[in-house]
Amino acid sequence: MLSSTRHAGRSRRTAAATAGLASITLALTACGSGSDDGSGSGSGEESGSGEITLTVATFNNFGYTDELLARYEEENPGVTVEHVTAARSEDARTNLTTKLAAGGEGLADIEAIEVDWLPELTQYPDLFTDLSDPEIEGRWLDWKVEQATTPDGKLIGYGTDIGPEAICYRADLFEAAGLPSDREEVAELLGGADATWEDYFEVGRQFVASSDAAWFDGATPTYQGMINQVMDAYEDPATGEPKDLASNTAVKDLYDQVVQAAVTDGLSAGLEQWSGDWDAAFQNDGFATMLCPAWMTGPIEERAGGVAGWDVADVFPGGGGNWGGSFLTVPASGAHTEEAKQLAAWLTAPEQQIAAFEFAGTFPSQVEAQASEQVQSFTNEFFGDAPVGQIFSARAQAIEGAPFKGPNYFSIHQSVQNALLRVDVTKEQDAEAGWQGALEEFASLGL
Amino acid sequence: MAVLSPTQPAPARGRPPGRRAPRRVGFSQRLGRWDVKLSPYLYISPFFVLFAVTGLFPLVYTAFVSVHQWNLLGGQGDFVGLQNYADVLDQPVFWRSLVNTVSIFVLSSVPQVLLAITIAALLDQNLRAATFWRMGVLVPYIVAPVAVSMIFGRMFADQYGFVNALLGIVGIDPVGWHSDRFASHLAIATIVNYRWTGYNALIFLAAMQAVPRELYEAAVIDGAGRVRQFFSVTVPQIRATIIFVVITSTIGGLQIFDEVRMYDAAGLGGPSKNWMTTVLYLYDVAWGNQKNFGRAAAVAWILFVLIIGIGMINFLLTRRISTSGPSTPKVSRRHTRALLERARAAGAATTTPPAAGPAPGTGAPPSGGARAGAARAGTTPEEDR
């Protein structure tokens, strides 16, 4: 009797120990497998007879509809295309950089990137597949290709859209202030083909003298437009070395000019882009003009719904200017880089980019697409039926090249932008104190 | 089977220690000894294994990263010793972020705990539709922090903000919620409080519900009013919970991130870093323009040490404050050990040695497990924030 109890007791304990072990093992394997299939892409699951799945990761709205992707699947039997979209580009960026840092595990076969991420990514060209291909040479504007070319000549991204800049303005506020409001007349008023920033600010002074609204939204977006026309703003293109900000007269001149216009002359509404106040100002007649890359028409319409009078003028101070734009890259760690490259080439072909433009308003970077009938005849109802296709194509023609942006570009740029915000938006400092702050911030970067 | 069954009589149960016994006893004894020695550790090991994987390893690895040059994309660089720590401590932005963090923490945690305990005391009364009110206070907690921050970001906008509009009606000048340092801290603390007060109130409420009602009856007989009851019965009785809430909200308060990240468009603490907290600074160093993981890891470790320090001070302070009443008699460890030993001796006298073995062995783990469980309970909410 005694022995039987003992026996039972032992086996129960053994069972418990086994259960304990099993639960640990389970917990551990759960952890282990989680990191494997949580991504579900990268490798692209093979299912039998040479069928592959390619994942495309984009953000915001690239205009790649399900129908478009289905067409590729039809034309290429055995390929399934999956499309993953991040709501905001910052999310996509964090995802991309973190996974690249982790050795590429879990990345999509095609990762969309913004032009601003390129300075840091081109430092590690080995992380991406070289996409250069003689067949598609000349598809894009030259500077668009240059942006995604690494110093050693690798092409790491196929261009999707660009952001040629025009001036968006409120025709009704222009009229109320006694200025011409027709889009050709406004283009002429602002200086026409050889408009300068001084012209733009001068008309602004006339405008604010007879209106309650400000001339432009804020000093920072305006400065951004200006600095984007300086080919070697903060760094030496030859060496990539950062220039000393204190002795960088080109930057200081622009800073002085924009502060003079924004704060001293009172042309600025004192807003930071994408802030709550900026959103609200669209409904409150906060400002009459703003620098307007092609993709900005969407955000303006979103915020200014119900406000009549927005229009686009085919003019930009200081020549052409580009703001933003994206690329498709193929991470080198993917299992099907060759097929992914093919898909990326297809997606960035003129026909597909025209479809994307019609769907999402992303202005194509392909020469042929810009000249196409569909783009040229495209009008925007919200902007008084302005022929935006034609206007932005003309603005794209005016762009002479892309400025050099090295690894430290955005750190330095941010210190100047912060100075402008302090002077223009929060108004806690005057122009000189703001600049001193920028110099301090630059110094603390330790470059 | 049918043929074999007669030769193999009814298994084990009624069988005398029979033919195969000698061999099996040796093994089973060895197994038994392993069992006694090993299984307690196995029982408690899931916690330690999980802790090693999710707690200890990241800590140690962060320390390893912090003594190297380490770019997010480039990976491990040269060993630089404590250079990263020196660099971080040398940055004015770091110190500024620390002041911001402490300021926001004080502005949020203190009113939060006081308000939560008050709300809990109200909810502890005999209310009509009690569950409705109790669930009601939890509503802010289930709203996504990013959504909360976006709504409050618009309310606290400088030019067209709701709060400034309200102030304008009363005739107060608009407040520069994004230009004045203190105002920005106040606004962010409001967002934090909105989200966490209800949650803490529910924790307090749960503790209050466990207070024996006889104590209140006795207090009433002694002539204590509502306020006196609260301070003399409720507060001392929920002391442990107060310590828990204060410590978790301290840890959470020092790790504020979502609210400040969403407070303005750029999410980097404003042009003068007026509301950049230390965790946001860490994020900016690691994932911002610098992509400097080494330095970010150093910030993480400095913050870790700091939180432990402040947590300790906090613990000591809270213990003193809330032990104003007679505390529950504390049993010293020596006393427990003596009791255990006596029980063990008694156990050894009554049962045969091998079977008695497990008794003290299995007696120990539950207390260890409970302690581990408490430690875990203390750490989870902080991760959430």
Image (tube, helix red, strand yellow):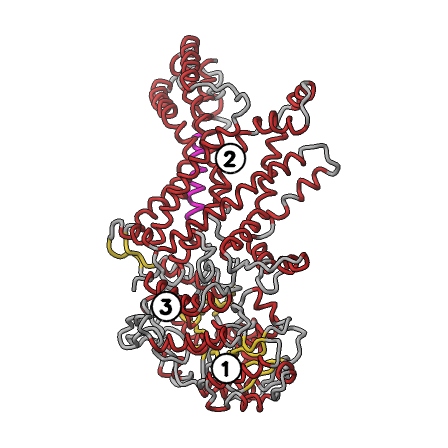
Residue A152 image position (x, y, % from top left):
28, 75
Q: Residue at x 41, y 49 (%)?
A: B98
Chain letter of the residue beneath label 3 in the structure image = A
Of residues A399 and B48, the one nearer the viewer is A399
Mark earlier in primary sequence (3, 1): 1
Chain letter of the residue beneath label 2 in the structure image = B
Residue beneath disc 3? A412
Tag 3: amino acid: Ile
Q: Residue at x 54, y 32 (%)?
A: B241
In the figure, B63 relative to A1: above or below?
below
**Residue A434 got which mark?**
none
Q: Nearer the viewer, mark 3 or mark 1?
A: 1
Q: Nearer the viewer, mark 2 or mark 1?
A: 1
| Label 2 and label 3 in one chain | no
Residue A378 image position (x, y, % from top left):
58, 85
Tag 2: amino acid: Phe
Residue A10 located left or right of residue B295: right
Labels 2 & 1 near each other (Cβ < 8 A): no
Secondary structure category for the residue under label 1: helix
**Residue B244 got which mark?**
2
Tag 1: amino acid: Phe
Q: Residues within 10 Å of mark 1 (few under 14, many from 20)?
A: many
Which quarter of the picture shows residue A432?
bottom left
- The residues bearing labels 3 and 1 have C-alpha atoms spaced at a distance of 26 Å
Q: Which residues are magenta?
A: A15-32
Residue beneath disc 1? A201
Which quarter of the picture shows residue B239?
top right
Q: Nearer the viewer, mark 2 or mark 3?
A: 3
Which quarter of the picture shows residue B210?
top right
